Image (spheres, helix red, strand yellow):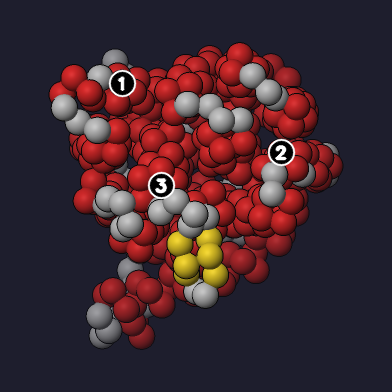
Amino acid sequence: MSKQSKSIFAWAMYDWANSAYAVTVLVAVMPIYWAEGIVPEGGVHLFGTLLTAEVLWPYMISAAAVMAFIAAPVLGAIADFNANKRGFLTFFCVLGAAATMGLFLCGEGDVIPAMILFILSNIGFVGGNVFYDAFLTDIADDDSIDWISGKGYAYGYVGGGLQLALSLGFILGADSFGIDGGMAARIVLLFTGLWWFGFALISLSKLRDQGRPAELPDEDKSKSRYLALAKIGLKRTLQTTGKIRRFRHVVFFLLAFLVYNDAVQTVITQASLFGSQEMGLESTTLMITILIIQFVAFFGALLFGWMGRRIGAKNSLIVSLVVWCAIVIYAYFMESQMEFFALGVILGLVLGGVQSLSRSLYGSMIPRTAGAEFYGFYSVFAKFSTIFGPAVFGAVTQVTGSMRQAILSLIVFFIVGIALLLFVNVSEARKLKQGELFSGSN
């Protein structure tokens, strides 16, 4: 195996590791355990308002997104200046995995502790992905970036799917161990954190930063290094905010991504609650559907990675978003378990495509000397796009009393996203990034 192949493998293994969190905590087990095992029946009074589990869940995801939104670009700027993406990746990995394992301690009525630990785990997941994504521009060029990004997601879908399969098997067989469903879910959450941290060690031991740390400015050398880096990170973030406007097509892409990813993430995080609360499906059915999504998404990521090399990442991305429009219309009319399974197959196919192509298309248009800095902004838009979608979804559900009305409203996000993508000229953006508008030492 060549040095580059080893680097690609090590990079992709982090997707294998943390996808267990994405599928088990965000989608499969935690939403159900949250609704049936932590939040009391009928809801809980918070901030003077009675909130049910299905309303509180998307609001909690939005709160975590706001925190990540504030910190990501500054930390990315510091990582580029200090040539220490690996260090930040390690910190957020440990934070997220530890908080996930801590959810094992949360039982019935532990709403506030569960909220705190979930938000911390989500910050670890999001923060780690900023620096994980930033490594992509170190190991891939414009010709290979779509394929390598797709490969990372493919590893993630298999790893997350395998971990979920083991978790599902344990939950189904919990009675034979004398364990009730609530304790089984808690053990699975502990297992998820261990899986995340354990396999991440492969990536953390092999990935290496390129370049050397920049020298602190003379006026900052007398200060604490941490304070100096914080000042530099904030300064670089403000500089990048000003300079990024020169990358007109990158801005159009980020706006498009902000809108369509809002809908994608809302579907992902609300699918289990939709199936259980709106359709009355059993938890086993929901987890089997999520397993279907995971393993189909493996092929979807590779398929759309291949399409990206043939017809271009932008065109392939638009194709996937058209399919997403059809998905939310189909979901509105779903009634049976088999229809839910069919939805899982279609969703899995395009889920891998929209995620891997978004990451690689963005990576192909940004300056390599500011990878973490720009991926910090990418993460900001990714997480900002999980603020409005879930919040709107929760509000529509609260007002109409129907999650079907909420999911149908997401089609607007996809249509607007497609319209904005049409303004992105990828060739012009890739030419512009060759200019020295950004320097790793600014």
Instruction: State which quadrant residue 415 falls in.
Output: top right
Q: Is residue 336 visible?
A: yes
Q: Secondary structure at mark 2?
A: helix
Asked whether 104 or 224 is in front, the reply is: 104
Give the spatial CA distance, label 2 vs label 1: 29 Å
Point 32% across, 78% down: residue: 227
Mark 1 residue type: Leu
Give the spatial CA distance, label 3 vs label 2: 21 Å
Q: Secondary structure at mark 3?
A: helix
Instruction: State which quadrant residue 270 falls in.
Output: top right
- The residue beneath circle 2 is 404
What label sits on residue 410 in the rendered view?
Answer: none
Asked whether 326 or 274 is in front, the reply is: 274
Asked whether 295 or 374 is in front, the reply is: 295
x, y (%) of residue 392? 68, 55
- The residue beneath circle 1 is 172
- The residue beneath circle 3 is 34
x, y (%) of residue 172? 31, 21
- Is the residue under label 2 in contact with that under label 3 (CB below 8 Å)? no
Point 44% across, 42% down: residue: 31
Label 1 environment density (alpha carbons within 10 Å; few <14, some 14–19, many ≥20): few
